[in-house]
Image (cartoon, coloured by chain):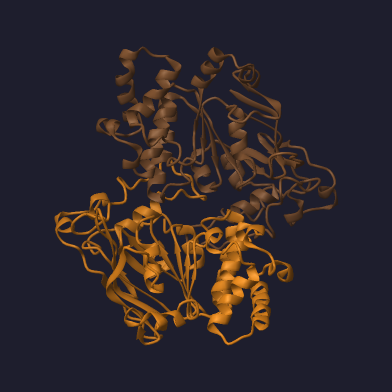
Amino acid sequence: MLEVKDLTKHFIVYEKGIILKRRLGEVHAVDHVSFEVRRNETLGLVGESGCGKTTIAKCILYLEPPTSGDILFEGKNITKIFRSGDRAQVLALRRQMQYVFQNPYASLDPRMTVADIIMEPFEVHKHIPRSQWLDRMYELLGNVGLEDYHAERYPHEFSGGQRQRICIARALAVNPRFIAADEPVASLDVSVRAQILNLLQDLQKKLGITYLYISHDLSTVRHICDRVAVMYLGKLVEVAETDELFENPLHPYTVALMSAIPVPDPKHKTSRIVLPGEVPSPINPPTGCRFHPRCSRAIDICSKVEPELVEVRPGHWLACYNPWPSKSAPAGQN
Amino acid sequence: MSYPTVDPVLRVVGLRTYFYTFAGIVKAVDGVSLQVNQGEMVGLVGESGSGKTVTAQSIMRIIPSPGKIVDGRIEFEGKDLLQMGESEMQKIRGKDIAYIPQDPTTTLDPVYSVGDQLAEVIMKHQKLSKRDALAKASRLLEAVEIPDPGVRINQYPHELSGGTKQRVAIARALSCEPSVILADEPTTALDVTIQAQILDLLKDLKQRLEVAIILITHDMGIVAETCDRVTVMYAGQICETGTVEQVFEEPKHPYTEALLKSVPSLALRRERLSVIPGNVPNLVEPPTGCRFHPRCSYSQQICIDKDPMLEPIGDGRSVHCHRWKDINLESPVSS
């Protein structure tokens, strides 16, 4: 349904000051990334902060113009359409693709009531007649588990979980077929997190929505996603079906990431792989495989030639010269 | 609670801390009791707004206005911290009881170098010259596994990454060989792989220095992996307390059960997550009786009418629930 082809996004860093700004370098936020999202599936995009997850989602929706690469939605090259700036066509695309932001405290206008927030897309897109606006708004509130009387309230009267429901209702207002959900539960409490994850799953079943689910939290990813793509420093390192990835992780970074997650079971004995050091700067990423300075399995070639993402097993893609052998990785979770 | 073998290093009894706001009195901590022994890591878990941080701030006596500690005792080395004058407290704060705050970015002073910040604490509590204090600071940076301590000591906080800043905050907490460390969500602002490094460091320090640590967190996974005992908080009160094995394998309070069940698991994939209905209550007007009753699936009339006692149930465990004997709770861990 959605195909990302060779997507690259570089941000240019300038020297401080107003005149005579010198170019200091480029942040390689996303570097030659390709993947696809299939109809009605949830694709998880996982990685640590700064690895480029959010940038990818923003490039897909053209909230950030990509530096190069193409994005195909239903076979159409949407980057071209966005770039052309043809308002009617752009709005038509926006009705199909929506975004749910990470922080529900910052993404709702505090001076608008919930009704205004949810009905604003109607005003922009004019896709339904004004006489139906109120009915549709109440229907959306019901869909996300809010009550009719919430409509006249302002965002500050709601808890984080309820605000995220409002954000989801706003995204649903244009009947999208694709939603990029950027860490939708990261800022919520554990007991409320489960409510929102269940809501996302219910909506998918009911409305047939495709999700790109961005998260740094592998346990919610395991719960909600059909396939998972793991990112490190602007590159995809491993892509596979969720069960395959969790039972049979191959890339040393995936394995380390999984073993780093604390398991809520005191009997569980972790063979934790603690990664040395920190994520390097994306301004000067390491040569070869970007993970090699922290990798325990690095061999000579890793620092010289960048590995390609290749299909190593059916549906399991990997960019690594010396992966963990199948089924024997000390993932610690199995 | 009975611990016949050792005397706790720190014991909090019936602590109540209220905030006197315009909207009313917020009972942020309402009758909290807990204790920590030497060389032990106690987890204090709960959701945001459950009173974990206020409990830690009460122990340090750094409650921001308009908060006040209205009742309770905090026993440390045979003395009640709440009866002490401020000057006496200053000798303990930072020296015997140290605090690792949640966000290292905001708690390190941006205009002082790492070395100066550490030396300031050392010189305040120990009679050392600036040069000796800096030498000690450098050894501390080494103890918390910061590479190149000689370089780092002259750097300013903005030159350090989040993980390194948190290590500096830990070094500062360790600088005067405290007997108790309060670590308030020390890894929440960090990435998982860095979190693993910091948790390993804390566990290692606990074993090497035999320091007592109270680890405040909302992550049940962190508790299970690092703590010896755990105290679960909800809306300013203790739900239950016990060893990690006891609480995770046989939870006695419905909130603990619900919390364990609502966490998605890496190991097994469930069709739907079980959900705790509703939201954390408003503490200006907390629910009557047991504060968890509106969200509890086992609640009965007595839970609405009467606040239960924190009741010792043997094996060093206590539970704050009327019905713990009647209900049969299950844990996703034991199954």
Residue at image point 73% right, 71% down: B150
Q: Position of residue B12 (x, y in %)?
A: 34, 75
Locate residue B22 relative to residue A213 in the image: left or right: left
Q: Is residue B324 visible?
A: yes
Residue at image point 60% right, 57% down: B162
Locate residue B220 relative to residue A114 in the image: left or right: right
Locate residue B271 relative to residue B330 in the image: left or right: right
Which residue is nearer to you in this view: B30 or B169? B169
Q: Position of residue A79 (x, y in %)?
A: 64, 22
Which residue is nearer to you in this view: B296 or B48? B48
Give the image quarter of residue B65.
bottom left
Q: What colour denotes chain A?
A: brown
Which residue is nearer to you in this view: A111 or B274? A111
Locate residue A200 relative to residue B281 in the image: left or right: right
Q: Position of residue B87 (x, y in %)?
A: 41, 82
Quarter of the figure that contains the N terminus of chain A = top right
Q: Which chain is orange?
A: B
B195, above or below A105, in the image: below
Residue at image point 53% right, 43% down: A221
Q: Position of residue B177 (x, y in %)?
A: 55, 81
> How many discs mark residues in the rendered view?
0
Q: Is residue A37 visible?
A: no
